[in-house]
């Protein structure tokens, strides 16, 4: 095949999970490339204050830049490229991009989650200014404030219930749909008194910060709007490779293996709480296990 670069390890995704994995594999002298399509949502976070080791808050983009520099220092190649497809050729994985193919003996999927974006006017103008995609991350910033969660399925209902721990003033906005979620979750929604509004959400508005959304043609005041309309992405690869998926997330064993040889998944794409520290932990675990597969030994990474 033309224009094929070979590496020991291919990592798809340059977020906390993928970058951490690459730090470990590169330090273990495995030639590693990280392919990242450059749309990391963490870069929209102005303030990260719950990640260990930073006594002062830092922004998501600074954290990512530092991670990239750190990984490059050990020899990782980081390329701004979208992985378009993955195939298995002999004992290797081959990832196609618009600029050619990459062959690797081992592969780590760290593609995060891709939130489906609703068609709500002005939404991106208020991201990080009242519009959020993660209750665990930003819920505490909206304590006792009036908030909406945009979603109608399990994920949306779960986010609304989680948000209720910070404020009782929560509305589930289903954007023209009926609630289609697990009975137990719907009951809990009812018990907590979370009102469901089924009208369409067409626009958000505000000045510097979000002031509200247009719901069913009427202005509806809100301090925060959490988008939780489901997950997508990552799955194409899982489907291509025949890896198990459930509820949109890659299913792994405890050691983060996927059932295919030398193929691991790490970070948000495996489900669970979305936190940098958890993604970093999974990136570490996946990398250490892949190093063991490729080098036949456990490399204790004490430096
Ligand atoms: C606004 C915001 C604020 C947050 N604040 C916090 C916080 O304060 N504290 C905290 O702990 N967590 C926070 N989080 C959650 C945290 O960002 C995630 O849990 C973490 O980034 C997950 O890391 P990851 O590496 O698994 O995935 P990601 O960081 O999502 O990285 C995945 C990467 O893969 C790339 N990718 C996907 N598909 C492809 C492809 N086909 N080809 C190439 N590249 C691809 C994406 O572009 C992305 O760069 C926040 C999230 C958001 C959105």
Image (spheres, rainbow, N blue to C red):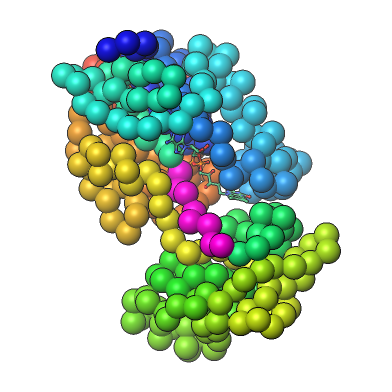
- Front residue of 165 and 217: 217
Residue stretch rendered in magenta on the structure: 112-119
Percent x, y of residue 164: 58, 76
Inspect the magenta stretch and tell me whether residue 279 lies in it: no
Query: Which residue is most to the right?
Result: 207
Q: On the rendered structure, is 43 left or right of 270?
A: right
User: Residue, x 20% and y 41% (percent of image)?
Assistant: 242
* Residue 157 showing in the rendered view: no
Which residue is painted at 43% across and 24% down in the image? Answer: 98
Q: Quadrant of residue 217?
A: bottom right
Does 215 appear above or below 81?
A: below
Q: Is residue 116 magenta?
A: yes
Q: Where in the figure is residue 49, as x and y percent of width and height?
A: 69, 48
Picture coordinates of residue 228, whole percent (x, y):
51, 64
Q: Nearer the viewer, residue 117 or 63?
A: 117
- Main structural element of the magenta stretch: helix, strand or loop? loop
Q: Residue at x 25, y 39 (%)?
A: 240
Left or right: where 70 falls relative to 299: right
Locate residue 71: give its quadrant: top right
The image quadrant of residue 146 is bottom right
Whether 114 is drawn above or below 118: the answer is above
Percent position of residue 27, x then y: 46, 15
Q: Please tell me which residue is depicted at 56% across the width and 77% down the height of the picture.
A: 200
Question: Can residue 88 be seen at all in this image of the molecule?
Answer: yes
Residue 271 as seen in the image, left or right of residue 37: left
């Amino acid at each position: 095949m033309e224009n094929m670069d070979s590496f020991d390890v291919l990592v798809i995704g340059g977020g906390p999970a993928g970058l951490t994995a690459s730090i470990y594999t590169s330090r273990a002298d495995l030639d590693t490339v990280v392919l990242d399509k450059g749309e990391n949502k963490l870069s929209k976070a102005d303030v990260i204050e719950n990640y260990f080791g930073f006594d002062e808050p830092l922004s998501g983009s600074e954290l990512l830049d530092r991670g990239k520099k750190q990984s490059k220092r050990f020899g990782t190649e980081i390329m701004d490229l979208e992985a378009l497809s993955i195939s298995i050729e002999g004992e290797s994985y081959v990832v196609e991009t618009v600029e050619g193919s990459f062959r690797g003996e081992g592969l780590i999927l760290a593609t995060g989650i891709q939130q489906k974006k609703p068609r709500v006017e002005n939404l991106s103008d208020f991201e990080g200014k009242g519009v959020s995609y993660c209750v665990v991350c930003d819920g505490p910033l909206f304590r006792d404030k009036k908030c909406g969660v945009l979603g109608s399925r399990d994920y949306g209902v779960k986010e609304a219930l989680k948000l209720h721990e910070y404020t009782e003033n929560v509305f589930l906005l289903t954007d023209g749909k009926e609630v289609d979620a697990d009975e137990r979750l719907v009951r809990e929604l009812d018990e907590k008194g979370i009102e469901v509004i089924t009208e369409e959400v067409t626009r958000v508005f505000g000045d510097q910060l979000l002031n509200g959304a247009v719901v069913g043609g009427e202005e509806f005041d809100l301090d925060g709007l959490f988008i939780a309309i489901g997950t997508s992405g990552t799955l194409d690869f899982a489907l291509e490779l025949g890896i198990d998926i459930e509820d949109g997330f890659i299913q792994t064993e405890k050691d983060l293996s996927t059932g295919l040889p030398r193929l691991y998944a790490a970070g948000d794409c495996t489900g669970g709480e979305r936190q940098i520290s958890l993604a970093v932990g999974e990136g570490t675990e996946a990398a250490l296990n892949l190093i063991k597969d490729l080098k036949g030994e456990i490399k204790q990474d004490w430096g």
